[in-house]
Amino acid sequence: MKRLAEVLRMIKFEHTLFALPFAFMGMLFAANGWPGWRLVLLVTLAMVFARSAAMAFNRLVDADVDGENPRTKERSLPAGRLSRGFVMVYVLVNSIAFLAVCGFINRLTLLLSPVALAVVLFYSYTKRFTSFSHLVLGLGLAIAPTGGWIAVTGHFDLSPLFLSAAVLFWVAGFDVLYSLQDVEFDRTKGLYSIPAKVGTGRSLLLARAFHFLAFLLLAGFSIVIGAGHWFNIGVAVSALLLVYEHRLVSADDLSRLNAAFFTVNSFVSILLLVCTILKFTV
């Protein structure tokens, strides 16, 4: 149990709240209602396995850097509470489990599963060569709604891409905010991020622009799919939450950054899922 608790702490299991609701939304809209327990269970497992593999791989790749950063030096690997060998096996097991679960969903999810896995693992290297790593992280989570849609339909559609694009810019926006904690460290170590490249003030403006794009794309998805008034209420309240998030953080005060990063953004994803459920049940 102690090892399990350490693993869950390493992968920040609670952050699954960011992407999983969007996978469920993709399924609900594709099925025009409840997609069935089998698909819900399979997609949930696929999301958990993929995210667990990605987060553990990220910790493995960043172990040396994390050990030098005062903010992250107490993470499981640099602090020695988990070994590299254990984490490598954990990544491999979760990756295989993800591919296997996708094989039980449908043929297209199986064919696309290596691509999805490659995207979420590739993110871990992007801070070594591009300041747009935030957008790559967003792309990894943006797979969720389209993946949920394909799980139900077995084919591509343009409609969920609006929702996926919204997730991409939403994630990129809050990841830019999160990266403000490490501006000086990233510059010292030659790591790439938008805050390290353009500074705090411009990063805050860019994060707001990303979130404004996310709002427009959510509204576009609602129009294209005919999401209805419950979903529109969710989009409107989500916009207010994002405004509140940006009011929590300023160039002179980053003390409430964690509240802006986790609390507000988890409310956004859960709120949109609840409003989607209300669309099909009320």
Image (tube, rainbow, N blue to C red):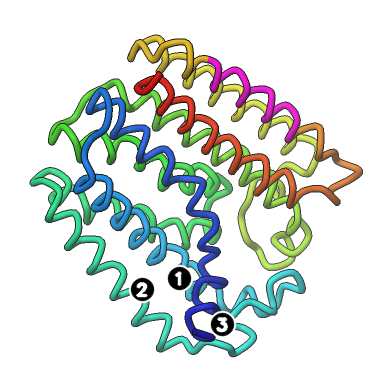
Numbered disc 3: secondary structure: loop
Q: Is residue 29 left or right of residue 2?
A: left
Which residue matches tag 2? 91
Above or below, comparing residue 68 to residue 198 in the picture: below
Disc 1 crowd rating (10 Å Cα; few below 14, some 14-19, many 20+) is many
Mark 2 or mark 1: whose residue is earlier in sequence: 1
> Which residue: 23% across, 35% down?
35
> Which residue: 28% across, 34% down?
27
Q: Is residue 193 left or right of residue 228?
A: right
> Which residue: 22% across, 28% down?
31
Image location (x, y in percent) of residue 218:
48, 21
Image location (x, y in percent) of residue 153:
15, 32
Residue segment shown in magenta? 233-245
Instruction: Name the disc covering residue 77, or none.
Output: 3
Q: Identify which residue, 93 or 6, lies in the foreground.
A: 6
* The quarter of the displayed image where residue 70 is located: bottom right
Numbered disc 1: secondary structure: helix
* The quarter of the displayed image where residue 29 is located: top left
Residue extending furthest front? Answer: 282
Amino acid identity at mark 2: Val
Mark 3 or mark 1: whose residue is earlier in sequence: 1
* The quarter of the displayed image where residue 237 is located: top right
Q: Is residue 120 left or right of residue 29?
A: right
Amino acid identity at mark 3: Leu
Which residue matches tag 1? 56
Would you say the residues marked 2 and 1 are in contact, meaning their CB atoms lie under 8 Å apart?
A: yes
Image location (x, y in percent) of residue 88:
38, 81
